[in-house]
Image (cartoon, rainbow, N blue to C red):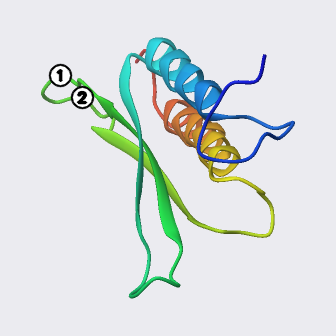
């Protein structure tokens, strides 16, 4: 059975996949993960900006950032659907979070 969403059926990720990846990243990184879609440009021809962000509950004095985010414009040449674009933004977000952890000293 095909899940319904905002687009025509495809073989790529849909909005259920986006939701599940958000939940997985939230649990994995102990963060509040969100995807925000907002208008890009003026008028009806500007497309949308897709922002994926992770907000962390950090202790005072922590060297970890309070937030990590990525954003990309859509439509793009790579992703046919908005859901696929959002899914990819979440993968990029995971990569950016990994870079933050690689730059931190866990033990002194």
70 vs 5: above or below: below
The N terminus, quarter of image: top right
Q: Residue furthest left?
A: 60
Q: Left of 61 or right of it: where is 95? A: right
Q: Left of 82 or right of it: where is 52? A: left
45 vs 7: above or below: below
What's the distance in space between the residues labelled 2 and 1, CA to CA? 6 Å
In front of the other: 40 or 8? 8
Q: Residue at x 51, y 30 (%)?
A: 101
Residue 59 badge: 1
Q: Position of residue 92 (x, y in %)?
A: 63, 44
Q: Residue at x 46, y 19 (%)?
A: 29
Local SS, label 1: loop
Q: Left of 15 or right of it: where is 51? A: left
Q: Residue furthest right?
A: 11
Q: Position of residue 28 (x, y in %)?
A: 51, 14
In front of the other: 84 or 33? 84
Q: Residue at x 49, y 67 (%)?
A: 48
Q: Residue at x 40, y 87 (%)?
A: 43
In front of the other: 29 or 35? 35
91 vs 57: above or below: below
The C terminus, quarter of image: top left
Local SS, label 2: loop
In front of the other: 36 or 9? 9
Q: Residues within 10 Å of mark 1 (few under 14, many from 20)?
A: few
Callouts 2 and 1 close, C-beta under 8 Å: yes
Residue 92 badge: none
Residue 62 badge: 2
Q: Position of residue 44 (x, y in %)?
A: 46, 82
Q: Position of residue 72 (x, y in %)?
A: 56, 63
Q: Residues within 10 Å of mark 2 (few under 14, many from 20)?
A: few
């Amino acid at each position: 059975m095909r899940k319904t969403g905002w687009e025509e059926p495809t073989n790529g990720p849909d909005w259920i996949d986006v939701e599940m990846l958000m939940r997985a990243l939230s649990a994995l990184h102990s963060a509040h993960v969100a995807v925000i879609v907002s208008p890009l440009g003026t008028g009806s021809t500007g497309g949308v900006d897709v922002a994926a962000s992770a907000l962390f509950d950090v202790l005072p004095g922590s060297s970890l950032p309070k937030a990590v985010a990525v954003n990309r414009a859509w439509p793009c040449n790579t992703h046919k659907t908005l859901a696929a674009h959002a899914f990819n933004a979440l993968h990029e977000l995971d990569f950016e979070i990994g870079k933050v952890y690689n730059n931190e000293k866990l033990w002194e």
